Image: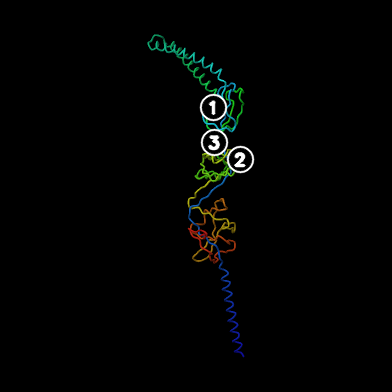
Amino acid sequence: MNLKRVFYSLVMVSLIFTISCKNDTKVQEEVVKLVKVEMISDQQNVEYLSFNGKVKEKSLTLLSFRVGGPLVSVNVNAGDYVNSGDLIAQIDKRDYQIQLDNAKAQYFQIKGEYERYKELYNKDKIPANTYEKIESGYLMAKAGYENATNQLNDTELKAPISGYIHEKMVENFNTVGPGQPIFSIIDMSELEVIISVPENHVLEMKSCQENYLSVKNADVFEIPIKLKSVNEKTGKDGMYEVRFIMKNKDNYNIYPGMSAEVKVVCEGTGNEIYLSSDVVFMDNNKTCVWVYNPVKQLVRKQEVVLASLHPGGELEIIKGLKAGDFIVTAGVHSLSDAQKVRPIKMGSASNVGGLL
């Protein structure tokens, strides 16, 4: 009877031991978590900044006569396109023609007298002061003749540039004065785009060489544009004004005043590391990531230093990681230091994230 009890006792112990081992194995298996792992690539990164702005014409010029008088013809209206040199308005020439005729007569009379006195002076037949008086009168008559000629020519107002008449400020037969604005003309051969940039992005404006313009209402997207200027001082709003320029084309249908978006693209140096914000976590007020050791199949907590938040929610890492490191990209809040894990699928430099 005692032998039977001993035998049954041994059997029970054996069963308990076997069940215990199976449970331990199950617990051990549960500890090995499945995680998604990616390798940090040393490929060159590209970042971009996006700003809203306004389209502006190359120039808006006020046109006026240099002389005054009654208008006798106005040849254009607002919205008309004119070519450089086109006659767009004219003042009555009558009084200016009379002035020119008088100035011309005086000039040629004094010119003949001046030439005779000059010949005598060269032969030492008249004193120098007499010749100088005649020469002075000749030069004054010549200047008067040239001025009268210019004034007659200035009764015609011609377009200094090719462009569109923006505003017509007078009607025909009105009397206008010298310098009084008659028309405004806009040059749209080139277009400017003006944006406002905060101080932390001013240097990037100067260093980034690729810039693209999108104008939604014109159905135009990603047109290359060139940086024209960056103001050296902020405006009243504390922002720096940045201007871009582009050649205009008829098929663009872009007009001054339209809202626009400018994308500034900067290529990195190859040392930048960008991670999704889901990868990082906070621990004791420190920003950390989980670094995976493929040999030991363990994760360790690694503190990192952030530079800034970039478009798309990416974080730039400037310290704590290097190319070739494996990091956990999912389930970062359910891990512990030195925990054993198994990657779902390893990433590589040519297949980051296992997308291929």
Classed neighbour count for the residue bearing mark 2: other residues with Cα under 10 Å, few (<14), some (14–19), many (≥20): few
Q: Which mark is residue 4?
A: none
**Image point 59% across, 63% down: which residue?**
334
- For the N terminus, the image quarter is bottom right
Q: Earlier in the sequence, mark 2 or mark 1?
A: 1
- Per the model, the C-alpha gap separating discs 1 and 3 is 20 Å
In the image, residue 6 lies at what x, y percent? 60, 87
In the image, residue 62 lies at what x, y percent? 57, 29
Mark 1 or 3: in front is: 1
Query: How many circles with numbers are drawn on the protein?
Result: 3
Classed neighbour count for the residue bearing mark 3: other residues with Cα under 10 Å, few (<14), some (14–19), many (≥20): many
Mark 3 or 2: in front is: 3
Circle 1 is placed at which residue position? 87
Circle 2 is placed at which residue position? 237
- Per the model, the C-alpha gap separating discs 3 and 2 is 28 Å
Which amino acid type corresponds to the residue marked 2 in the rendered image?
Asp
Position above or below: 279 against 17:
above
* Frontmost residue, 205 versus 73: 73
Mark 2 or 1: in front is: 1
| Pointers 1 and 3 in contact (C-beta within 8 Å) | no
Circle 3 is placed at which residue position? 188
Which amino acid type corresponds to the residue marked 3 in the rendered image?
Met
- Secondary structure found at label 3: strand
* Frontmost residue, 324 versus 252: 252
- Secondary structure found at label 2: loop
* Frontmost residue, 34 versus 165: 165
Position above or below: 112 against 330:
above
Q: Earlier in the sequence, mark 3 or mark 2?
A: 3
Which amino acid type corresponds to the residue marked 1 in the rendered image?
Leu
For the rendered model, the colour scheme is: rainbow
**Image point 57% across, 20% down: which residue?**
92
